[in-house]
Image (cartoon, helix red, strand yellow):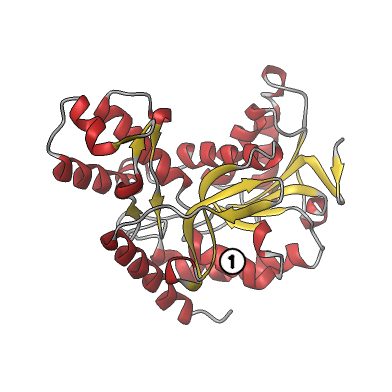
Amino acid sequence: MRQMDGVNLRKVAVIGCGFVGSASAFSLMNSGLFSEIVLIDANQEKAEGEAMDISHGILFARQMKIYAGNYDDIVDASIIIVTAGANQKPDETRLDLVHKNVAIFKSIIPEIAKRGCKGILLVVANPVDILTYTALKLSGFEENRVIGSGTVLDTARLKYELGKHLQVDSKSVHAFIIGEHGDSEIAAWSSANVSGIALDEFCEMRGHFEHQDAMLAIGEKVKNSAYEIIKRKQATYYGIAMAVKRICEVIIRDEKSILPISSMMHGEYGLEDVVLSMPAIVGKNGQETKVPITLNEKEQRKLSQSASTLKEILKELDL
């Protein structure tokens, strides 16, 4: 058992055993990152059922302990993943979920805070930027260890679509979705490249010349991905479960990878007292530092508008 500052690096807690929470636990079971996974849900039987079901696959993975627990079981967890919240319904935006899920967080976060947990608090529930801000205010934890999954999945979707469009490995595509994880998100095209080659130039290498139309179509497809999936199967969970696994991997292995996580802004791009997604170096202590990327004037303006959208919602909340 690897201990560090009262934290067991091989232990993770998942709060909320709905579609996203259970899929994330399953993904983490397969990752080999942890030897202990504790599941917590308002419905104890649901948590027990998920723990039993996932545990039955241990024979085909690595030896570990997976069980339903309570808040006393999370004290030494290295990462506490909060997925609890109401599901997004068809035709409902992530911001429509605000009041329902802030109320849920007001019951969850104080339980975490009063136990003096030293691990990283990873918020995954939507709207993730608002709820990361909520978790930060209610927990009193240091800002570096309260992060949201942000636009990690949106960015993966963007790289996937660009890779498909250009017929190149999406891992060679370097591009970010920034701002709100939601309808005001921005594809940062001006800093996008493929292995160091400017995106427009690489597109032309691959026989694509209608850059503006293609970027607009890909950006819209990425932004509407969740809606399209929810329309067909009522929920999204596999993609975000893999994003959660990746964030945990970066933290546990202290990779210092650059991920577009949700974190508090302190003057970057002229933004203050709002949580949104921008690239940051992530490691064992959570967020280490934000990474400034080049934005053109239009992207900067859209980022400010995205922040304003979130700040208007924050004004309605009693935090």
Quadrant of image for the C terminus? bottom right
- Can residue 227 be seen here? The reply is no
Residue 179 screen position, x and y as percent: 41, 59
- Above or below, comparing residue 212 to residue 270 in the picture: above
Instruction: In this rendered view, identify the residue nearer to me: 319 or 87.
Output: 319
- The residue beneath circle 1 is 104
In the visual, does 299 lie left or right of 249?
Answer: left
Q: Position of residue 206 (x, y in %)?
A: 21, 25
Residue at image point 59% right, 66% down: 104
Position of residue 17 measured from the top left corner of the image (x, y, whole percent): 61, 47
Callout 1 crowding tier (Cα within 10 Å): few <14, some 14–19, many ≥20: some
- Determine whether, in the image, residue 210 is placed left or right of residue 92: left
157 or 63, which lies in front? 157
Q: Is residue 88 above or below residue 11?
A: below
Q: Amino acid at mark 1?
A: Ile
Location of residue 289 (image quadrant): bottom right
For image coordinates 72% across by 18% down, the residue present is 59
- Residue drawn at x 39%, y 30% as measured from the top left: 195
**Which residue is more in the foreground, 138 or 190?**
190
Q: How many numbered circles are shown? A: 1
**Left or right of 108, for residue 117:** right
* In the image: residue 192, left or right of residue 109: left
Q: Quadrant of the N terminus?
A: top right
Q: Residue at x 66, y 68 (%)?
A: 107
Q: Secondary structure at mark 1?
A: helix
Q: Based on the displayed image, in which of its 4 quarters is residue 228 positioned?
A: top left
Q: Residue lying at the far top in this picture: please name it.
A: 60
Q: 142 above or below 283?
A: below
- Whether residue 179 is visible to the viewer of this picture, yes or no, is yes
**Residue 34 place in picture, x, y as percent:** 73, 34
